[in-house]
C-alpha cells in the first residue's frame, strides 16, 4: 500500500518558493500548466514567485 504524505499550506508555499528560485536559475518559463487534481493552488503560488513586477500576467 502507498503511504500518504500530508503537507500543510505553509509547506506548499515554502516548496513553491524554493522551486521558483531553482526554475529561474535554469530557464525563464512563460507558461505554467496545472493538474486539476490538486495542482491549481501550487501553480498559482508558483506563478506569484516567478512573476517579475511590471510584467504582464
Image (spheres, grey):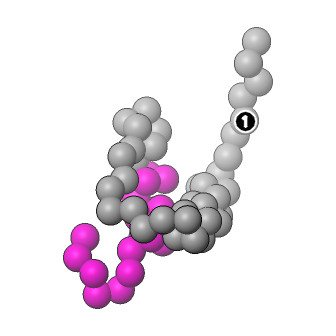
* Nearer to me, 22 or 40: 22
Q: Is residue 20 visible?
A: no
What residue range appears in magenta?
41-57
Q: Position of residue 32 (x, y in %)?
A: 37, 53
Residue neighbourhood size for the residue with mark 1, other residues' Cα within 10 Å, grouped as few (<14), some (14–19), many (≥20) = few
| Residue for point 37% across, 36% down | 36
Is 2 magenta? The answer is no
Q: Residue pushed farthest top?
A: 1
52 is higher (above) or lower (below) than 18: below
> Number of labelled discs?
1
Quadrant where the N terminus sits is top right
Is 54 magenta? The answer is yes
| Residue for point 61% across, 65% down | 22
Q: Position of residue 16 (x, y in %)?
A: 57, 61
Q: Which residue is mark 1?
A: 5
33 is higher (above) or lower (below) than 3: below
21 is higher (above) or lower (below) than 3: below
Q: Is residue 21 visible?
A: yes
Residue 9 picture quarter: bottom right
Instruction: Give the left or right position of residue 25, taking residue 32 as reference.
Output: right
Circle 1: element type = loop
* Nearer to me, 20 or 39: 20
Amino acid at each position: 500500500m502507498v503511504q500518504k504524505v500530508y503537507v500543510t499550506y505553509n509547506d506548499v508555499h515554502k516548496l513553491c518558493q524554493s522551486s521558483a528560485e531553482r526554475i529561474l536559475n535554469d530557464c525563464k518559463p512563460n507558461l505554467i500548466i496545472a493538474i486539476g487534481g490538486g495542482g491549481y493552488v501550487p501553480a498559482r503560488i508558483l506563478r506569484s514567485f516567478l512573476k517579475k513586477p511590471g510584467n504582464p500576467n
